[in-house]
Structure formats: structure tokens, C-alpha cells
Image (spheres, grey):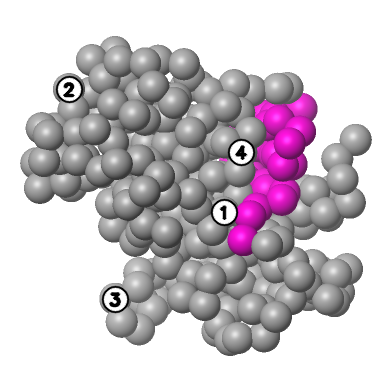
Amino acid sequence: MPGRDLSLLIDAARKAGKIAAHYWDRSPRKWDKPGGHGPVTEADIEIDRMLRDTLTAARPDYGWLSEETEDGTTRLGRGSTFIVDPIDGTRSFIAGERNFAHSLAVAADGQVQAGVVFLPMLDRLYIAERGRGATLNGVPIAASTTATEAAATLLATRHALDVAHWPGGVPPVRRSFRPSLAYRLALVAQGRFDGMVGFHGCWEWDIAAGSLIASEAGAHVTDRDGAALRFNNREPLLPGIIVASEMLHSALMARRGTQEGHARR
């Protein structure tokens, strides 16, 4: 049985999916966020409002961090915090594509304790609790054990495989891509891809839930310099992400020229 927080997140994610389905492929109202932070739709805002009302009513002592809610410092003094992206992959949602996701997590003491990534139009519910493994639609999942770069397929943008990021040479991997960071992490957790890399900053709401799901499925998850991820930071922007089996991760870090685990403390 899922723990209380995970059950709460699952129920909320399914409610979010119903709202998204109502707007999906029906030309929802959209506009661009200030500062070049991408598009947002009326569906994002409605889902954000529902999630905030539902989750904080159930856990009034938890903090709140969401892509679509103005941030503050109150959450920093809370023991646990919800970290939420109402729609991860908004551009795909606007385009009528199915591979957008809802990403919901609870973090405490810098670590994600429970996470849900739900793709309502594909009916894929990825969940995890710390120390209890990860599942897809109730079936346990496991990350790839691929150890060599030549045999690996990574989820990454074209920019992530630019030579500037790899002092030791660009790894000889096959590249694939999905627009939602949360979905990329879930796909690695599922073992459908061998890993993922991203070298731009990652907002916590994009990767909180998916990073736990990938880790609980057996993948090695760090920032771009090999350091452990910590969440609910004052500035909720993490320095990239690298996810793969332990051996593949080490091979990628060697090409990055970074001593894993010691680059950033």
C-alpha cells in the first residue's frame, strides 16, 4: 500500500489529468511568461490552483513550490514541501501531443520522499517512495544496467551532446529526446532508455518526482558535476542532471572531466 503522502499525490495527479484532458487538443488560451520562461496555458493555471488547494488543505503544515505559483521563503522553514509542475511539457500540450506529464513530489530534509509522474493521455502512472522501489501502473520497474557508452541510448537535447560539455570527448551514444524532463526521467526508470543528461539548470519542479522514480528503479542520479541532488533550495534551480547505471554514469563523468561526488559540496 502506498504511504499517506504518495496516495495523496496519486489522487491529485489523477484529478490533474482530468483537467488536462478537458483542455487537451482544444486550443486552450495561452500566453508567454515574462523573462522568456516559455508558454503557459489556462490549463496549467487551473491545475496549479487545484493542486495547491487540494494538497495544502490535506497537509497545511507542508510548504509549497510550483512552477506556476509565485515563490516565497515560507517553504524554507517547513519540514516537508510539495514540489509540483502542473504540466511538464506545456509546448507539447499546446501542440496536441500526448507526452506531457504532471509531476508531483514531497521533499523533506532536502530529499524527495514520494513522487508521481502521470501522463494522462497515455495512461502511464509512475510512482515511487524512498526505499520502496518504483512502479509503472502498479508493476515494478527497473532501470537499464547498460555499462558501455557505445551500447547506450541517452535522452538529451542536441545541445547536451555538444563538444563544449565533454572535455574528454563526446560519448559515442545514440541520442533520443522527449520534451518533458519528468517523462525522460520516468523512461530511464522504466529501462526504455539507458540514461539522460542535461547541462542547463534544471528547475526543481521538473525533476523532483522523476529523480526519485529513477533512483528507486536503480539508476544513479546526480547533478552535472556528480554531486547528489538536494531539493527545496532557496533558489530552486539545480545545476543540470546526469542519470544512468552506475558504470555508465562513471564513464560519462570521466568524459566530463569531473571527479564524481567531489565537484560540488
Please report whichever mark, 4 or 3, sits nearer to the chain's N-terminal start. Answer: 3
Amino acid tagged 2:
Pro
Relative image position of residue 256 (x, y in whole percent): 21, 40
Relative image position of residue 51 (x, y in whole percent): 72, 67
Which residue is labeled 1 in the image?
A: 208
Q: CA distance from mark 2 to mark 1?
A: 28 Å
Horizontal side, residue 217 vs residue 164: left or right? right
Q: CA distance from mark 2 to mark 4?
A: 26 Å
Q: Nearer the viewer, mark 2 or mark 3?
A: 2
Does 209 lie within the magenta span? Answer: no
Residue plotted at (68% across, 48% down): 115
Residue 36 tag number: 3
Which residue is labeled 4 in the image?
A: 213
Q: Quadrant of the N terminus?
A: top right
Amino acid tagged 1:
Ala
Badge count = 4
- What's the magenta region? 110-138
Which residue is labeled 2 in the image?
A: 172
Residue plotted at (73% across, 36% down): 131
